[in-house]
């Protein structure tokens, strides 16, 4: 219980730091945010009176700490405020964007797991064989290819030349295939390399021959000892991939013209819509912190020695 409380306290400190850093960066960003908001609202040059009204409305005419607390106080109860451009509450638009982004992220993660686990198992059956070298080569190529370039290649092949799949939008399930593959192939490449290394390392543990001499079945040894040992680095990479999927989604959603957190964030940055930008950053930070908490919990279930070391 004490360890869990410490983890939650660390998470609270991280989220507070993220909120303060995000607000400070936006507050001190170059340019006049009131002018950007006015242009996004009206599309024309506006008078000084209108700019002063926007500054007062958005809180730009107050001090930094006053404005920060005015934004943070509602945030503590889940209120992200109102858009500086449209005047609409941020939360409904944010939920709509997340409804496109989160399913795509989970589908990409699932495809990455489905591809990486069999590929790593095939590679480790005969280390050094042509299958092993081929799997490592494919994983290395997948890690090296940038997501934006891979997305353009998939559009060129499957949407332009073959005409099998749509390239832009999110009207049907088919529109999610190419974005999901773009993200999934990078995830599969990273997981394949880590899982292969973890399995090979687990098989070299000095205590394993003792189990075989006692007559323990190879399948039981693999399930009870090799798999948990190999899963620890995989959990780390899987958690990081899930957290950093948001970063890749920003690029992928822009390339495929999909609605979601990526396009939501890009449009908010262009319009200097601070409440929307801050909302996306806070949501991303919450996801990242939550994933790390889950990783710590899973670590302790895979390796109980961690609790004894903490004690």
Image (cartoon, rainbow, N blue to C red):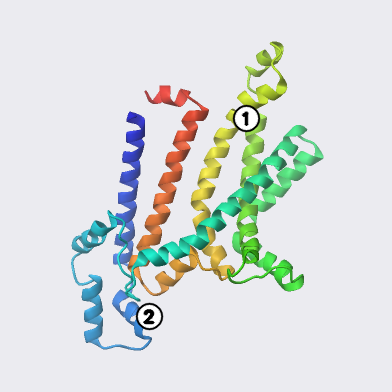
Mark positioned earlier in the residue sequence (2 or 1) = 2
| Residue 64: quarter of image | bottom left
In the rendered view, tell whether residue 286 sits above or below residue 228: below
Callout 2: helix, strand or loop? helix
> Could you say which is closer to the camera, residue 236 or residue 94?
94
In the rendered view, tell whether residue 65 sits above or below residue 236: below
> Could you say which is closer to the camera, residue 272 or residue 103?
103
**Quadrant where the C terminus is found in the figure:** top left
Instruction: Tell me whether the residue at label 2 lies in contact with that at label 1, contact meaning CB atoms closer than 8 angstroms.
Output: no
Q: Residue at x 39, y 75 (%)?
A: 271
Q: Residue at x 51, y 46 (%)?
A: 240
- Left or right, residue 215 beside residue 290: right
Outermost residue on the top side: it is: 214
In the rendered view, tell whether residue 43 sits above or below residue 182: below
* Circle 2 crowding by C-alpha within 10 Å: few under 14, some 14–19, many from 20: some
* Circle 1 crowding by C-alpha within 10 Å: few under 14, some 14–19, many from 20: some
x and y percentages locating residue 114 in the rendered image: 66, 46
Alpha-carbon distance for marks 2 and 1?
54 Å
> Could you say which is closer to the camera, residue 94 or residue 269?
94
x and y percentages locating residue 219 in the rendered image: 70, 24
- Left or right, residue 263 beside residue 160: left
x and y percentages locating residue 1 in the rendered image: 34, 29
| Residue 154: quarter of image | bottom right
x and y percentages locating residue 167 in the rendered image: 65, 70
Callout 1: helix, strand or loop? helix
Q: Residue at x 31, y 40 (%)?
A: 9
Q: Residue at x 32, y 29 (%)?
A: 2
Q: Which mark is residue 311?
A: none
Q: Which residue is mark 2?
A: 40
Q: Which residue is mark 1?
A: 227
């Amino acid at each position: 219980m004490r360890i869990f409380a410490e983890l939650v306290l660390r998470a609270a400190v991280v989220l507070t730091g993220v909120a303060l850093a995000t607000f400070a960066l936006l507050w001190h960003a170059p340019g006049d945010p009131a002018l950007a908001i006015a242009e996004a609202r009206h599309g024309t040059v506006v008078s000084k009176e209108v700019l002063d009204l926007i500054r007062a409305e958005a809180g730009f005419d107050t001090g930094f700490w006053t404005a920060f607390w005015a934004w943070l106080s509602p945030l503590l109860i889940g209120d992200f405020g109102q858009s500086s451009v449209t005047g609409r509450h941020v939360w409904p638009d944010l939920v709509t964007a997340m409804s496109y982004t989160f399913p795509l992220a989970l589908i990409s993660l699932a495809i990455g797991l489905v591809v990486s686990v069999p590929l790593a198992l095939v590679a480790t059956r005969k280390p050094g064989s042509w299958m092993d070298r081929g799997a490592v080569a494919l994983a290395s190529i997948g890690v090296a290819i940038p997501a934006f370039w891979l997305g353009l290649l998939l559009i060129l092949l499957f949407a332009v030349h073959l005409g099998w799949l749509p390239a832009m939008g999110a009207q049907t399930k088919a529109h999610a295939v190419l974005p999901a593959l773009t993200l999934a192939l990078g995830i599969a490449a990273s997981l394949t390399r880590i899982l292969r290394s973890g399995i090979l390392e687990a098989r070299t543990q000095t205590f394993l021959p003792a189990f075989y001499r006692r007559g323990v079945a190879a399948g039981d040894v693999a399930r009870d000892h090799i798999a948990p040992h190999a899963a620890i680095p995989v959990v780390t990479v899987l958690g990081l991939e899930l957290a950093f999927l948001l970063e890749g989604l920003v690029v992928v959603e822009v390339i495929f013209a999909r609605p979601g957190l990526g396009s939501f964030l890009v449009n908010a940055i262009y319009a200097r819509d601070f409440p929307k930008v801050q909302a996306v950053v806070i949501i991303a930070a919450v996801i990242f912190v939550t994933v790390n908490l889950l990783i710590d919990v899973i670590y302790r279930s895979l390796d109980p020695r961690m609790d004894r070391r903490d004690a």
